[in-house]
Image (cartoon, rainbow, N blue to C red):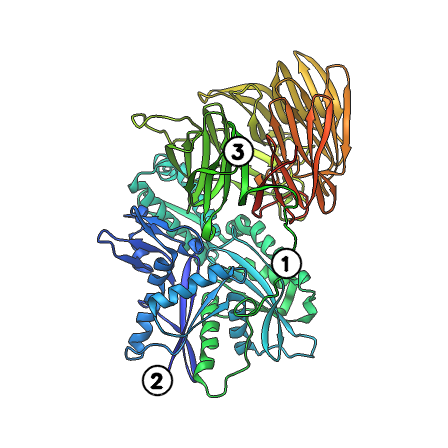
């Protein structure tokens, strides 16, 4: 009987497998396909289906399906049709498809070894889940786990030849643009095989699915003109019929995307809308250009952190289905020329490499071994003092926290990596806990807690009572994470819109983003009150950013007429909106100039929008903050200004490279001025007393950035009644908490790393990362001294 082995890449969006005998390695087809969707679906009889058959049933039973079960590894179970399904069960169903197909080829025998691949950054706990999947499907069969870039390098090495130690080209780079994520790593080659060097890089928000959604919304723009009623239902309705139509349109978008790798344009007939839609390759490339540029920058970053130069590379190996896109290869070749290596089917590279790894067990003399750091190697354990120093720790694994209503709310990572929201008393005792999917935003007020969790292409927004009882829920179909505000008993959900797209000088515009935002007012209701899920549009908007690296759009340009993320108005019951606009004005017989403007408005709890001012390009005054406390207070391109009727006064001037914002407490107003946005440094605090600014202190820098639109980079400032808790840097590696009360500034404490105040004597602390713009890692909830 022929001895054989199996390698399987359980991908985020698609799964592929390959089999190996002693002298041959080849892709394993399932139901005639070289890869299958990673979709799982629980049918009405309780049977867990996987792959193509599950994908075809998604439209009929979207609540019973999960397209990306791999994202649940190390997290809480997914809910399919009301039943809890673990990641082990879901991935086991996918693996079973390949085991059954392979056994049919080898007379029902079991493989000598099974090799499963995993992202290089996965933890030991996540890798353990893969081992459990293997034991579930093939009990007793030896299993090996291999990092995905290592497997890719193994296959490319067999195809193009391994790097040679000592010839100056001892390394390779792997560029993996898959269906669900982007990852890149650099590997060196020695006599013992491939080893990952430096820090791998990646972006979970850039993938083939990301590009599918861009094409989806490109088609949506056409359909909104061709059949607006149909498109409105598809883009907003939660009814099963329209969710199925959205699923079909997303499939059409994916097929069009794949067609553009071979053809100059792609068209689809949309049955439900009775309309034809079309996209050309230049249009598609414009939609994804910034994402491709970012992946190239991440590859360069990974290469730099490995200590290698392009001259030391044997090749840049492309893997993942989306790497077949022409713009990807063209962009990489512009930087790495002939180092770029491709194969006919990059989707199967990782599984073929896994099978080649497994092939070693079938040969008397194994080929050159390959090492996989992080799997099975001993790790030196270094014991250090308590990382949170003198602070009493109330909770760990906390991503964000709010001190309000006399209690503590935490959003954190639970056991196995799942997100959860907790209600704690003042001593850190858990009073209530809610497991969630991936939380993408929250807001806490006196009578309302808003939480948004990502569920595929939709965001689910929950309105909860202060004791975390879910009062109502609404699903919103959007590829973008929402912006949430809660005040008293009202919440506002702001969406970026379906036609959001980046722009730059190639469009005749500054570095920015055009969007069609909308909002939804959320209030707690009884079970007898219907919840409306029809967002109200705010019209087309424009946001202008500082072009810091040619890829990111995160810091508002303080001199430009931008849209600004909504903020509380200051009256306790309304929001302030600043909407950047563009229009075209004829300047000659054939010429039209692009004219910027701004709309300043308020939005109340009923959803009524009231325009405060229309700023035109003739005024030279652009707002970045709108606040009302008896009078109007604005942060503008000039600085911090006050308005009373037509009387306008400049309170503090904006630094040329920085920005400024107002902070309001119950009885005081403060001005916070950041001297430099890039890099983030220099901070001054001013007290407003209607006569002249009083400087209360200057500091090296702020934790967070006043100009950022990224939630994790928001300024670490907490208003606590009539006091302000403020986090600043004291050095490159330490931060401090300040308490501002009237004209007094008290230094509460200093600590190494990141120390972020919550108010009411609580803070988040982690010795890593160093204080700066951003913190995304879990922290400890601690009690401050005093």
How far across and down, in percent of the image, does residue 681 sit?
74, 39
Q: Is residue 532 left or right of residue 183?
A: left
Q: Residue visible at 68% across and 29% down?
A: 739
Q: Residue visible at 43% across and 61% down?
A: 129
Mark 3 or mark 2: which is in front? 3
Where does label 2 land, which residue?
Answer: 2
How far across and down, in percent of the image, does residue 513 sit?
58, 39
Where does label 1 land, which residue?
Answer: 383
Identify whether 558 is placed above or below 34.
Answer: above
How far across and down, in percent of the image, does residue 238 sit?
34, 38
How far across and down, in percent of the image, does residue 486 sit?
49, 28
Q: Nearer the viewer, residue 602 or 1?
A: 1
Q: Earlier in the sequence, mark 2 or mark 1?
A: 2
Locate the C terminus by quadrant: top right
Gap between marks 2 and 1 measured at Cα: 50 Å
Where does label 3 land, which residue?
Answer: 426
Q: Earlier in the sequence, mark 1 or mark 3?
A: 1
Q: Nearer the viewer, residue 257 or 668?
A: 668
């Amino acid at each position: 009987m022929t001895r054989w082995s199996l390698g399987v890449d359980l991908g985020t969006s698609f799964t592929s497998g390959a089999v190996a005998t002693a002298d041959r390695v080849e892709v394993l087809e399932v139901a005639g396909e070289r890869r299958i969707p990673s979709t799982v679906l629980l049918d009405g009889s309780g049977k867990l289906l996987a792959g193509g058959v599950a994908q075809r049933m998604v439209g009929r039973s979207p609540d019973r399906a999960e397209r990306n079960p791999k994202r649940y590894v190390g997290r809480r179970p997914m809910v399919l049709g009301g039943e809890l399904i673990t990641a082990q069960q879901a991935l086991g169903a996918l693996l079973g498809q390949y085991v059954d197909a392979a056994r049919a080829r080898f007379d029902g025998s079991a493989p000598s070894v099974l090799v499963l691949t995993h992202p290089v950054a996965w933890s030991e706990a996540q890798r353990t889940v893969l081992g459990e999947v293997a034991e579930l499907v093939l009990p007793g069969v030896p299993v090996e786990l291999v990092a995905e870039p290592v497997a890719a390098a193994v296959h490319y090495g067999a195809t193009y030849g391994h790097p040679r130690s000592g010839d100056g080209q001892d390394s390779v780079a792997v560029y993996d643009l898959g269906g669900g994520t982007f990852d890149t790593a650099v590997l060196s080659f020695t006599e013992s095989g491939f080893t990952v060097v430096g820090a791998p890089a990646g972006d979970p928000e850039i993938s083939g699915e990301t590009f599918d959604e861009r094409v989806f919304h490109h088609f949506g723009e056409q359909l909104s003109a061709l059949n607006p009623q149909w498109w409105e239902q598809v883009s907003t309705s939660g009814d099963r019929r329209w969710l199925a139509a959205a699923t079909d349109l997303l499939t059409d978008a994916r097929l069009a995307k794949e067609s553009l790798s071979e053809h100059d344009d792609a068209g689809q007939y949309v049955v439900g809308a009775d309309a034809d839609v079309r996209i050309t390759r230049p249009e598609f490339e414009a939609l994804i250009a910034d994402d491709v540029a970012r992946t190239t920058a991440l590859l360069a970053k990974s290469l730099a952190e490995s200590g290698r130069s392009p001259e030391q590379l044997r090749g840049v190996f492309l893997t993942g289905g989306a790497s077949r896109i022409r713009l990807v290869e063209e962009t990489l070749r512009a930087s790495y020329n002939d180092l770029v290596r491709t194969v006919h089917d990059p989707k199967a590279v990782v599984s073929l490499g896994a099978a080649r790894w497994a092939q070693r067990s079938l040969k008397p003399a194994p080929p050159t071994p390959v090492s996989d750091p992080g799997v099975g190697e001993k790790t030196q354990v270094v014991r250090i003092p308590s990382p949170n120093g003198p602070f009493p720790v109330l909770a760990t694994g906390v991503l964000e926290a709010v001190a309000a209503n006399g209690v503590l709310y935490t959003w954190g990572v639970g056991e196995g990596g799942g997100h959860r929201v907790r209600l704690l008393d003042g001593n850190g005792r858990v009073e209530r806990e809610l497991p969630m999917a991936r939380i993408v935003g929250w807001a806490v007020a006196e009578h309302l807690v808003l939480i948004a969790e990502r569920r595929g292409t939709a965001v689910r927004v929950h309105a909860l009572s202060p004791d975390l009882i879910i009062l109502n829920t609404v699903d919103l179909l959007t590829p973008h994470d929402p912006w949430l505000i809660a005040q008293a008993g009202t919440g506002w959900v702001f969406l970026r819109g379906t036609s959001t797209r980046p722009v730059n000088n190639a469009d005749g515009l500054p570095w920015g983003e055009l969007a069609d935002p909308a909002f939804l007012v959320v209030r707690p209701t009884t079970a007898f009150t219907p919840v409306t899920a029809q967002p109200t549009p705010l019209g087309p908007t424009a946001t202008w950013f500082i072009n810091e690296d040619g890829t990111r759009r995160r810091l508002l340009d303080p001199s430009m007429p931008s849209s600004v993320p909504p903020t509380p108005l200051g009256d306790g019951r309304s929001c302030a909106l600043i909407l950047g606009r563009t229009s075209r004005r004829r300047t000659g017989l054939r010429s039209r100039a692009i004219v910027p403007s701004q709309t300043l408005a308020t939005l109340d709890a009923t959803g009524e929008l009231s325009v405060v001012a229309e700023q035109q390009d003739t005024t030279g005054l652009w707002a970045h903050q709108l606040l009302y406390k008896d009078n109007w207070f604005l942060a503008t391109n000039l600085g911090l200004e006050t308005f009373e009727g037509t009387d306008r006064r400049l309170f503090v001037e904006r630094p040329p490279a920085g920005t400024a914002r107002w902070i309001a407490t119950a009885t005081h107003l403060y001005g916070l001025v950041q001297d430099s946005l890039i890099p983030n440094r220099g901070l001054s605090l001013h007290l407003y007393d209607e006569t002249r600014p009083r400087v209360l202190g200057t500091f090296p820098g702020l934790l967070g950035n006043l100009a950022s639109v990224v939630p994790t980079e928001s300024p670490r400032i907490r208003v606590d009644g009539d006091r302000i808790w403020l986090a600043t840097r004291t050095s490159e590696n330490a931060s401090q908490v300040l308490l501002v009360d009237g004209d007094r500034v008290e230094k509460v404490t200093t600590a190494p790393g990141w120390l972020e105040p919550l108010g009411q004597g609580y803070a988040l602390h982690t010795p890593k990362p160093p204080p700066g713009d951003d913190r995304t890692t879990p922290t400890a909830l601690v009690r401050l001294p005093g």
